[in-house]
Amino acid sequence: MIKRLAILLTTASLAFGAATCPGHGTADSMLVSAAWLSTHLKDPGLVVIGVGPKAEFDKGHIAGSVSLELAAISAKGVPLTLEFPPMAELADTFAALGVTNTSRIVLYSVANSVQSATRVFLTLDAMGLGRNTALLDGGFTAWTGPVTTEVAAVKRGTVEPCPQTDIVVDAAYVSANLRHAGVDIIDARLPGFYTGEQIPNNQRAGHVPGAANIPFSSMFDGKGLLKSTDDLKAMLTSAGVKPGDRVVSYCHIGQQATVVYFVARYLGFDARLYDGSWQDWSARTDLPTEVSKKP
């Protein structure tokens, strides 16, 4: 997959030229509160995107927001469930939502699936728009502002991607970095899958050897808000992550692990996503697996 992505990135760079893109986000830019969004909802250049099934979006959404389903940013006709389509297709998809290279973008899930919103964040980060993109903390559940079923009028934007090559890795990279100092592999699945007690359909049991387990859902409090930076740092530290390390996350198909990717970037770590994740690793029977009694 990484070879295919490299070709896509190179092709996109030639096609779009040297566009000016914001680059990766930081703690100051990656997360906004419902109170902030309520105050800035009518700011010029703001694009609020409700991520998830259109049917859920149509039941009620943040006023002025636009709808995006994950299928629209996923490659068609490829073996793995989630892969980036060509950058030109992504640019067209986001331009149709009103996005430009200077837009301030806020993402939220319409179906209580934060990993869908962080998957879109990863995609925009890969396009070079990460610094302009934020997650709505607490998602739609935390929103107390205006809700509507009306479809917002959208003025089409123009997006020129600056493809980022430091976003995803493949099985060869992960295999070469098992228990490698400075590279921390994090399994974002629920503990049962990590230990091997639960086995995904038609896949092998267990986890990537040497990987630590941080379930993606454990990074949020009871209200669905992202935990404090101190708590998040403590979680990564407990998983063996040290300052200066690279965090490589994976899950079932490359969606839940985008939460760990988001958090690692938010905390200032060099982060990567193993996009093929367990679906890819398990299918490669030459690669080792590991089971354990506890995470």
Image: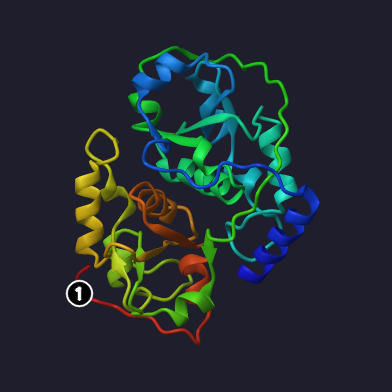
Q: Quadrant of the N terminus?
A: bottom right
* Left or right position of 11 against 109: right
Name the quarter where the C terminus is drawn: bottom left
Residue 145 figure quarter: top left
Is 228 placed above or below 103 here? Answer: below
Image position, residue 34 (x, y; %)? 36, 23
Position of 284 with respect to 194 (left or right) is right
Residue at point 23%, 41% (across, down): 228
Q: Residues within 10 Å of mark 1 (few under 14, many from 20)?
A: few
Q: Is residue 87 above or below residue 212?
A: above
- Dot 1 falls on a residue whose secondary structure is loop
Image location of residue 44, percent across then percent down: 58, 17
Report whether 18 appears left or right of 63: right
**Looking at the picture, how far across and down is residue 187, in whole percent?**
35, 64
Q: Residue furthest right?
A: 15
Number of disc labels? 1
Residue at image point 53% right, 58% down: 167
Q: Position of residue 108 (x, y in %)?
A: 46, 32
Under mark 1, the amino acid is Lys
Q: Which residue is mark 1?
A: 293
Residue 167 position (above or below residue 23): below
The front one of 224 and 236 is 236
In this view of the protein, can residue 20 be seen by the observer? yes
Q: Is residue 143 visible?
A: no
- Viewer-proximal residue among 5 and 266: 266
Its colouring scheme is rainbow
Q: Residue at x 29, y 68 (%)?
A: 212
Residue, far bottom = 286
